[in-house]
């Protein structure tokens, strides 16, 4: 058996805990798979399956580096790809080489999928379990075959003129490396799409937690996968509280979890829903994971939920800090404290999937808006799998909207990155076609604007960010709820990548200005370059941009937090505070809560020793805060850690 992580922010090593090394193949990947089990680890540990009898039982693990896999793919195919672009456009070889230095949409994800295939062949694994990134990134991964198929069509159109001259005028009928590359891309995209949809070869397991936001995200994800022709075979609900002594907090959470699991069962249809109970310690290492695997394999959906709520009243209640954080109002995080930490125009909230970034960002935006009624505040989600509307308990869209009960100076927006790209793309495409007409490529079906299909992946999210700052004068403070770690880091790196792409187009335009006047394309590129430059300056200015890391005091989220902090330092992004979310601040006499609080206290002490930032503690509540009133009440309970 082989378990592979495709999440850019890997946690597989943290879970297995045995010091394995990340791997990626040196040889070109092939396309043969025996059987692939895809485990969508959206909110917890990856699903683990036992090998069937007679199969190879050794477990191997790989943290896949899709960028390196793409680099190897490009090293093999760069010349053929460059020939297509040079022969099918007005670009010369130096322009083409600069373009090829940028990533091509879908190819890094495709290279990752092909790498999984190669590892299957090379290692003879009977089953491959794939631990993917959180929802938004995973949906992009599954869309990679279609994306690459579209790129193959663009390359084929660009290559048509050269093929026509070669076949009819030069009388050369044999295919070239360029023809073989286009055919290979189309074949690989089609084969992988077919394999992903073949339920005899691919099993999709969706992993969630028993919370309202997670259930809503699961519903949205199932619908998106169904539209893509993919079906989820099974749903696993992770970290469900087991039966235990009476406890107001635990009993309230048990009630809410049973309700969430009931909703999932109704929505799942015929799909089995299995439950994994929370253990006193995170399952890390072979022994603990094997125990978890046995429980999951033996469990049947009809008898999965054994937790019973005690006779204690299961209702919402307030939590007060316990004596381990010192019960004194001096430690409450007041408006002045918050301003000292977050006193910047642009504040990002990010961290591992499932730690509560959205709820923390929403509560923070409410506190900022209430404390400064004279300032215009925007809180915005850039996560493709939006949850901001769920946190505010409101219907939101791409336009900044007021929320009932919130301060009048607050607006909320769920960014539609695809729409932002379409708006910017329309102007760029028209200008590129105008330039292309001056060169008269003379190829039916090939247009200069087709080059936009080769723009760096993630450019849609950047254009979405730019659309916010195009109207930046409308807001004094912007709070950004980002996607989980890997996706968020790519967004922060994207201005540099797209800046290089724009600079390439501008160099091309200046090189050929004697043939074609800069015109509309020149104006579009100058405006885009200016906007990107201003965004890069804003991100680098510690007085105007800050990043708040949200985490939980558990081993796996803490390990990812450490790596995220290193990456943010590399990007020169200021991190004034770390939010230790959902802390058990009032454990009372409940043995389970006391064990949990003790473990959180140990991890918090370790984080304080390593962190260079202030620490904010937020209390665990049941139910989690939803809606303006609950978010306000919860935000007022935060304390300096």
Image (cartoon, grey):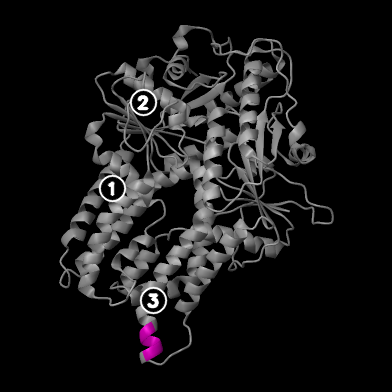
Tell me the residue that label 1 is attached to.
532
Q: Earlier in the sequence, mark 3 or mark 2?
A: 3
Point out the stretch of residues depicted in magenta.
164-168
Q: Earlier in the sequence, mark 2 or mark 1?
A: 2
Query: Residue at image x 29%, y 67%?
Result: 448
Q: Position of residue 281 (x, y in %)?
A: 70, 29
Q: CA distance from mark 2 to mark 1?
A: 23 Å
Q: Position of residue 89 (x, y in %)?
A: 31, 73
Question: Crowding near pointer 2: few (<14 within 10 Å), some, many (20+)?
Answer: many
Q: Is residue 91 left or right of residue 388?
A: left
Mark 3 element type: helix
Magenta span contains residue 513: no
Q: Is residue 533 left or right of residue 353?
A: left
Query: Residue at image x 32%, y 75%?
Result: 444
Question: Crowding near pointer 1: few (<14 within 10 Å), some, many (20+)?
Answer: many
Q: Earlier in the sequence, mark 3 or mark 1?
A: 3
Tell me the residue that label 2 is attached to.
342
Q: Position of residue 481 (x, y in %)?
A: 42, 34
Tag on residue 159? 3
Q: Main secondary structure of the magenta part?
A: helix
**The one of 262 and 372 positioned closer to us in this rendering:** 262
Q: How many marks?
A: 3
Mark 1 element type: helix
Mark 2 element type: helix
Q: Is residue 296 left or right of residue 502?
A: right
User: Toward which corner of the image does residue 104 lie, by quadrant?
Assistant: bottom left
Vertical relation: 591 (above or below) 427 = above
């Amino acid at each position: 058996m082989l378990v592979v992580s495709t999440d850019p922010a890997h946690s597989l090593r943290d879970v297995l805990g045995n010091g394995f090394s990340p791997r990626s193949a040196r040889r070109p990947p092939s396309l043969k798979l025996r059987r692939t089990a895809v485990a969508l680890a959206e909110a917890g540990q990856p699903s683990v399956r036992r090998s069937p009898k007679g199969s190879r039982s050794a477990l191997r693990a790989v943290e896949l580096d899709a960028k390196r896999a793409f680099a190897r793919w490009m090293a093999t195919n760069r010349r053929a790809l460059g020939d297509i672009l040079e022969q099918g456009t007005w670009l010369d070889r130096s322009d083409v080489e600069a373009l090829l230095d940028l990533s091509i949409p879908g190819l890094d994800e495709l290279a990752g999928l092909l790498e999984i295939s190669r590892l299957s062949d090379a290692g003879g694994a009977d089953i491959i379990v794939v631990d993917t990134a959180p929802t938004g990134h995973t949906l992009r991964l599954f869309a990679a075959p279609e994306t690459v198929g579209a790129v193959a069509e663009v390359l084929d159109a660009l290559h048509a003129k050269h093929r026509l001259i070669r076949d009819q005028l030069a009388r050369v009928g044999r295919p070239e490396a360029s023809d073989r590359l286009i055919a290979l891309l189309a074949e690989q995209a089609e084969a992988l799409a077919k394999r992903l949809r073949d339920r005899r070869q691919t099993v999709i397991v969706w992993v969630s937690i028993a919370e309202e936001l997670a259930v809503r995200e699961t519903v949205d994800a199932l619908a998106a996968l169904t539209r893509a022709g993919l079906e989820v075979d099974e749903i696993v609900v992770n970290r469900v509280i087991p039966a235990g002594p009476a406890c107001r907090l635990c009993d309230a959470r048990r009630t809410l979890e049973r309700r969430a699991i009931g909703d999932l069962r109704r929505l799942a249809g015929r799909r089995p829903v299995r439950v994994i109970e929370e253990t006193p310690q995170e399952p890390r290492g072979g022994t603990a994971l094997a125990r978890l695997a046995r429980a999951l394999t033996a469990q049947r959906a009809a008898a999965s939920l054994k937790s019973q709520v005690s006779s204690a009243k299961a209702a919402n209640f307030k939590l007060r800090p316990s004596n381990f954080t010192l019960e004194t109002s001096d430690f409450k995080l007041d408006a002045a404290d918050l301003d000292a930490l977050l006193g910047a125009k642009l504040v990002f909230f990010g961290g591992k999937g499932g730690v509560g970034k959205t709820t923390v960002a929403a509560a923070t935006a409410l506190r900022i808006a209430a404390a400064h009624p004279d300032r215009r505040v925007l809180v915005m989600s850039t996560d493709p799998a939006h949850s901001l509307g769920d946190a505010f308990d409101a219907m939101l869209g791409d336009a900044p909207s007021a929320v009932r009960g919130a301060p009048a100076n607050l607006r909320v927006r769920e960014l539609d990155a695809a729409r932002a790209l379409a708006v910017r793309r329309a102007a760029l495409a028209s200008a590129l076609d105008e330039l292309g007409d001056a060169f008269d490529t003379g190829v039916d079906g090939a247009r200069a604007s087709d080059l936009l299909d080769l723009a760096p992946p993630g450019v849609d999210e950047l254009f979405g960010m730019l659309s916010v700052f195009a109207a930046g004068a409308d807001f004094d403070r912007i709070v950004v709820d980002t996607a989980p770690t890997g996706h968020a880091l790519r967004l922060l790196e994207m201005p540099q990548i797209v800046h290089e792409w724009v600079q390439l187009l501008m160099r091309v335009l200046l090189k050929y200005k004697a043939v074609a006047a800069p015109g509309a394309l020149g104006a579009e590129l100058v405006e885009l370059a200016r906007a990107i430059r201003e965004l890069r300056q804003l991100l680098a200015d510690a007085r105007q941009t800050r990043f708040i890391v949200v985490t939980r005091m558990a081993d796996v989220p803490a390990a990812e937090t450490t790596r995220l902090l290193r990456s943010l330092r590399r990007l020169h992004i200021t991190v004034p505070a770390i939010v230790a979310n959902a802390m058990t601040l009032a454990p009372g006499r409940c043995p389970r809560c006391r064990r949990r609080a003790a473990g959180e206290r140990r991890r918090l002490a370790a984080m304080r020793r390593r962190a260079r930032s202030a620490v904010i503690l937020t209390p665990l509540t049941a139910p989690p805060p939803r809606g303006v009133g609950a978010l306000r009440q919860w935000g007022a309970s935060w304390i300096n850690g």
